[in-house]
Amino acid sequence: MLNPHTKLDIDWEWFNDRLDRQDGCERITAPHLALKKQIADGEIYYNTDNCSHHVYNSDTFRDWLPTNFLISEGYTGEVLIKVLEHPPASFTEPHTDGYGSVKRKFGLPKETNIKRLWIPCIDYKFGHAFFIGSEHVVINYSAGDVYDITPWHHTLHSGVNAGVEIRRTMTITGPYSG
């Protein structure tokens, strides 16, 4: 079982209210770049009908976090912070991470050590889950639980909302001293 290693202590009601109002952030339809060849055998099942979700992007998300949070996690430079929003009956297509978008955005060399945190923005609700390979299913979490998912970036993973309420999670990705 995968357990959180720390807690991001912010006012999650305030955070989600800002997202709802798109105050300082932009809500866009997620690009379906992850519909990749790596899932070739199941590719016909993954499409924009069932893999539809939104991403909140903002360069100001960093300002929404406690001052020393990123430093305490070992980040050494710019980070890409995204909030993924899955409506009921949707999921992120199974994929692996190469961190190419972060390396391109910040002009990082290919060999740069990259860290990714996964942080739920809403307490666990029925039907919400995060699958990592065939060994980890993350459920029963609280908003702000911090999971370091870096060790599994080459492992097939997927998030799902098989419930009836919105599912929101944050990822923080960037170079770190590791």
Image (cartoon, grey):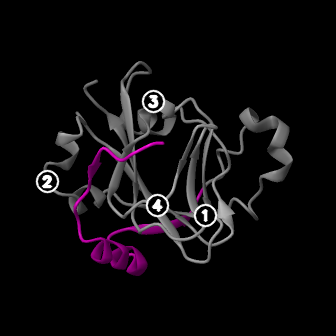
The relative height of residue 156 versus residue 65 in the rendered view (above or below) is above
Percent from the top left, x then y, of residue 77?
Answer: 24, 36
Q: Amino acid at mark 1?
A: His
The secondary structure type at the circle numbered 4 is loop
The relative height of residue 103 versus residue 95 in the rendered view (above or below) is above
- The residue positioned 30% from the left and 71% from the top of the image is 12
> Which residue is tagged 2?
67
Question: Is tag 2's residue or tag 3's residue first in the polypeptide sequence?
Answer: 2
108 vs 83, nearest the viewer = 83
- The residue positioned 47% from the left and 65% from the top of the image is 168
Horizontal relation, residue 124 to residue 16: left or right: right
Q: CA distance from mark 2 to mark 1?
A: 30 Å
Question: Is tag 2's residue or tag 1's residue first in the polypeptide sequence?
Answer: 1
> Which residue is tagged 1?
53
Horizontal relation, residue 44 to residue 64: left or right: right
Q: CA distance from mark 4 to mark 2?
A: 28 Å
Q: Amino acid at mark 2?
A: Thr
Q: Residues within 10 Å of mark 1 (few under 14, many from 20)?
A: many
Q: Residue furthest front?
A: 1
Q: CA distance from mark 4 to mark 1?
A: 22 Å
Look at the image and say whether residue 2 sits in the magenta stretch.
Answer: yes
Percent from the top left, x then y, of residue 39?
Answer: 75, 37
Look at the image and say whether residue 114 sits in the magenta stretch.
Answer: no
31 vs 95, nearest the viewer = 95
Q: Which residues are magenta?
A: 1-30
